[in-house]
Amino acid sequence: MIHSSYFRRKSQLYLIFSQVYCTSLRVVNHVRVRRAQRDWSQAELARRLGVSRQSVNSIETGRHDPSLPVALKLARLFGARVEELFSLEEDGGAEWEGMENYAGAYERETDPGVSPSPV
């Protein structure tokens, strides 16, 4: 018989590994392309958004993601939907199946009394 603590521990492991997997997503943006199409400088776009030129540069280079209000202002300025300016892409993260195998191995390693679960 398997104790409820086994399931609790297993769900905690999956939660941890799913968070690791989700962090392998990155935001891709097309702000620089849209700005260049309008022949605006970073300073001009910053003025229109009410932010610093450095903020625009950080958004364009992907160092920082814009806040929701700034993302909405960008979409309005460029006459686009937010989804057209920003999208999520996988950044070479591990496959979920690999995570399951790793979680099972970790579980057996930390608690030898746990019988291996089929993966």
Image (cartoon, grey):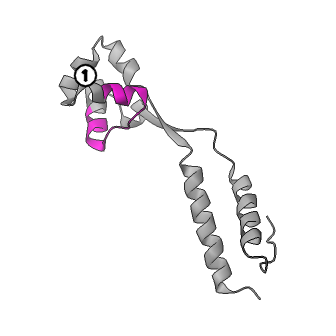
Q: How many marks?
A: 1
Q: Nearer the viewer, residue 28 or 116?
A: 116
**Image coordinates for residue 50, horizontal then vertical, percent:** 18, 30
**Image coordinates for residue 62, horizontal then vertical, percent:** 43, 31
- Please rate how many residues cluster around mark 1, counting C-alpha atoms within 10 Å: few if below 14, some from 14 to 19, many from 20: many
Q: What is the secondary structure assignment of the residue under circle 1? A: helix
Res. 108 image quadrant = bottom right
Q: Is 20 above or below relative to 35?
A: below
Magenta-colored segment: predominant secondary structure: helix
Quadrant the N terminus occupies:
bottom right
Res. 41 image quadrant = top left
Residue 65 among magenta residues: yes
Residue marked by disc 1: 45
Q: In the figure, is residue 26 to the left or right of 11?
A: left
Q: In the figure, is residue 88 to the left or right of 11?
A: left
Res. 48 image quadrant = top left
Residue 111 among magenta residues: no
**Image coordinates for residue 7, horizontal then vertical, percent:** 65, 78
Give the magenta-colored segment's residue range: 56-73
Q: Is 35 above or below relative to 108?
A: above
Q: Is 74 above or below relative to 6?
A: above
Quadrant the C terminus occupies:
bottom right
Residue at position x 51%, y 39% in the image: 26
Q: Nearer the viewer, residue 114 or 92?
A: 114
**Image coordinates for residue 4, horizontal then vertical, percent:** 65, 85
Residue at position x 73%, y 55% in the image: 97
Residue at position x 31%, y 36% in the image: 71
